[in-house]
Image (spheres, coloured by chain):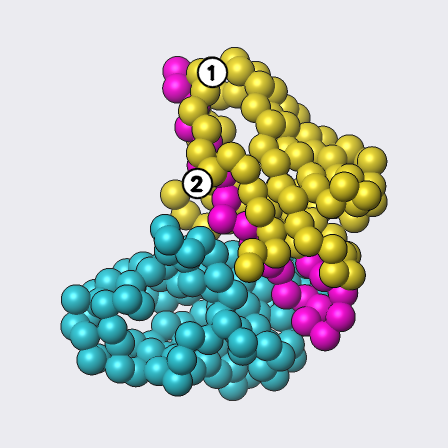
Chain colours: A cyan, B yellow
């Protein structure tokens, strides 16, 4: 298996622009997680899905952030409009079920908002 | 308030030293505790612990959970420069947010040759 795939790997954009991050989970994994990692706050959960349905979005910072999972093999995290404080590494992770809960992380997208 | 607290935040040792990393958590329907290693990229899974007092071991790394005192330790013996990384502790709780992991801030370990 190719593992969790994320794109792009790096994104540099200007304040106010829309940013879309993409994730393909491992085939057969029913749970998908979006995390943000910064030096100040560490690894934070933004939202997670089970069978394509959002379960907990309490970590989404504000309305500028939105996430979708239209099918079992694809998810997006969108920031509109982006701000410099959104600069971080965004990880997507997936797991088969909560009993095992060994989440497999993608390589991350390093976002820089100027 | 952080549900999972790791200490120390950073640690610098020399090759061959033994290190102990700590992770404590608050009690709220605990289910499992996981350790991850993060080098320059994504976190990779090390151990999952659910039962108190049972040591998990993989090579020079070992971990144990104390559910009574609400903490876990990760030991690394005979450290090598390749052990330099951030070590993350995460806890899963039972309940409505089953599936969610709460991560600590991590311990940055640096091993000098």
Q: Quadrant of residue B98?
A: bottom right
Front-most of residues A96 and B79: B79
The chain under label 2 reads B
Residue A74 shows in the view = no
Q: Of marks 2 and 1, which one's residue comes earlier in the chain?
A: 1
The disc at residue B39 is 2
Residue A75 rendering spot, x and y as whole percentages: 48, 77
Residue B15 is tagged as: 1
Where does residue B81 sit, x and y in percent of width and height? Answer: 43, 23
Q: Secondary structure at mark 1?
A: loop
Q: Secondary structure at mark 2?
A: loop
Q: Residue at x 61, y 83 (%)?
A: A53
Q: Residue at point 56% right, 42% down?
A: B6
- Please give the name of the residue rendered at 46% of the width and 28% of the height, measured from the top-left corner: B11
Q: Quadrant of the N terminus of chain B?
A: bottom right
Using the image, name the chain to which the residue with label 1 belongs: B
- Asked whether residue B59 is in view, the answer is yes
The outermost residue toward the front is B1
The residues bearing labels 2 and 1 have C-alpha atoms spaced at a distance of 17 Å
Residues B4 and A23: in front is B4
Q: Is A58 in the magenta?
A: no
Q: Which residues are magenta?
A: B92-113
Query: Picture coordinates of residue A106 (x, y %)?
Result: 47, 58
In this rendering, position of residue A36 left or right of residue B71:
left
């Amino acid at each position: 298996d190719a593992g969790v795939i994320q794109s792009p790997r790096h994104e540099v954009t200007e304040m106010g622009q829309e940013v879309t991050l993409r994730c393909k989970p491992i085939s057969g994994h029913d749970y998908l997680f979006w995390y943000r990692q910064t030096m100040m706050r560490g690894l934070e959960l933004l939202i997670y899905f089970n069978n394509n349905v959002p379960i907990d979005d309490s970590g989404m910072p504000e309305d500028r952030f939105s996430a979708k999972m239209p099918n079992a093999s694809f998810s997006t995290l969108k920031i509109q409009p982006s701000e410099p404080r959104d600069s971080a590494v965004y990880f997507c992770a997936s797991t088969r079920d909560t009993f095992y809960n060994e989440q497999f992380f993608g390589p991350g997208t390093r976002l820089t908002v100027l | 308030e952080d549900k999972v607290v790791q200490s120390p935040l950073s640690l610098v040792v020399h090759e061959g030293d033994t290190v102990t990393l700590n992770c404590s958590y608050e009690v709220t329907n605990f289910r499992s505790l996981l350790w991850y290693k993060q080098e320059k990229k994504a976190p990779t899974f090390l151990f999952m612990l659910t039962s108190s007092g049972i040591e998990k071991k993989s090579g020079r790394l070992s971990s144990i959970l104390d559910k009574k005192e609400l903490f876990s330790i990760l030991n690394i013996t005979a450290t090598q420069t390749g052990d330099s990384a951030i070590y993350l502790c995460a806890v899963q709780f039972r309940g409505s947010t089953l599936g969610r992991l709460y991560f600590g801030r991590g311990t940055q370990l640096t091993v000098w040759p």
